[in-house]
Image: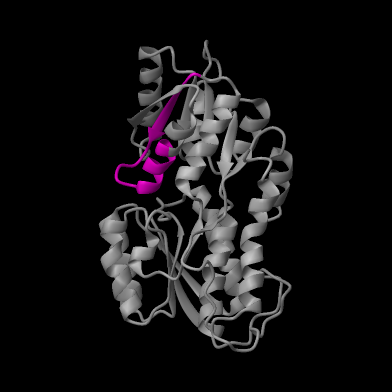
Amino acid sequence: MFKRHRRALLALPALALVLATAACSGGGKPPESNTGGGAGGQQANTPPMKVALISHAPPGDAFFDTIIKGAKDAGAKDNIDVQYSNDGDATKQASLVQTAIDSKVDGIAVSIPNPDALRPVIRKAVDAGIPVIAYNAGDRDWQSTGALAFYGEPEVLAGQAVGDQLAKAGKKKALCVVQAQGQVQLEDRCAGLKKAFTTGTTEEIFADGTDPGGYVSTVKAKLASDPTIDSVVTLHPGLGVAVANELKNSNPKPAVVTYAMTPDVYPLIKSGDIMFTIDQQPYLQGYMAIDSIWFYKKNGNILGANQSIPTGPLVIDQSNVDAVQKYAEAGGR
């Protein structure tokens, strides 16, 4: 189901952008910018802006590096200074949002893995007249924060994509491994998996993703205690790679599934050590988060009609991994 609709999903954000530009909520003239796209186009002739890009990612996270690249490319086009900061602790992430408010930034793009912790400070930003765009995490109830739009993956749907694929492959028991407690997007992936995996059963466990060695050991211990598990669903590409490498020579060898793409994932999909991954196009998330703030500041445009704008899920397996790798190596995805 999900691979058959791949082209349609890819087209959604671009179509939304065209429609919003044609029917401007602000009623003004089209934005004055070169349409070549990315950092290679001419810079917008609008006044310089400063936008805070804030995430819950740990330092050096390769997945978020792609989000940052997309954001920086949009910033280069839009004459925006994109200032990135991150913290995996929800309370500290909220402090980063407060710092952005105190710095009087022109806009904030923020992931929302813990809405309860971040909602009050995001509302403070909105009340201060700072436009906020949510991205990557928070599709469950970002609207309650006052953000203008959300770019990311509907996480329950992403979990259902995994359940559908495992069912088609004839799998019978899936282990869904959550690497961070309290992050709603991870819980939603496991919930979606359970909902769609009607031909089998699902069990959810926690393994600390900040300790990859311990994470792998927890997964191996669970597999040893329950030999009926025939598929392991990891929710982060780096952790998926770690598990796949550890289980390469296992007998029996469970299928390993992960989320998102990094350079280490490609060869493991090609070799079959990772059955497939769920791609949410992180470059697009970063690019659209920043570009949407520019459109709003320039012309009052808002995308999405208060609904999440999906950037996935897309199933990447041996049938299409080469094409995806080509685009990624060219600086996109």
Is 45 left, or right, of 247 in this rendering? right
Q: Say if the magenta span includes residue 174.
A: yes
At 52% from the left and 74% from the top, the residue drawn is 302
Please provide percent x and percent y for residue 112.
Answer: 37, 58
79, above or below 60, in the image: below
At 33% from the left and 36% from the top, the residue drawn is 208
Is 137 left, or right, of 26 in this rendering? left
**Image colouring:** one colour
Q: Which residues are magenta?
A: 172-191
Res 333 visible = no
Q: How many marks?
A: 0
Q: Say if the magenta span includes residue 47.
A: no
Is 110 left, or right, of 20 in this rendering? left
Where's the N terminus, which quadrant? Answer: top right
Please provide percent x and percent y for residue 95.
Answer: 28, 65
Q: Nearer the viewer, residue 157 or 63?
A: 157
Please provide percent x and percent y for residue 58.
Answer: 40, 50
245, above or below 133, in the image: above
238, above or below 292, in the image: above
Is 100 left, or right, of 319 in this rendering? left
At 61% from the left and 67% from the top, the residue drawn is 73
At 51% from the left and 43% from the top, the residue drawn is 158
Q: Nearer the viewer, residue 236 or 157?
A: 157
Give the quarter of the image for residue 283: bottom right
Res 85 visible = yes
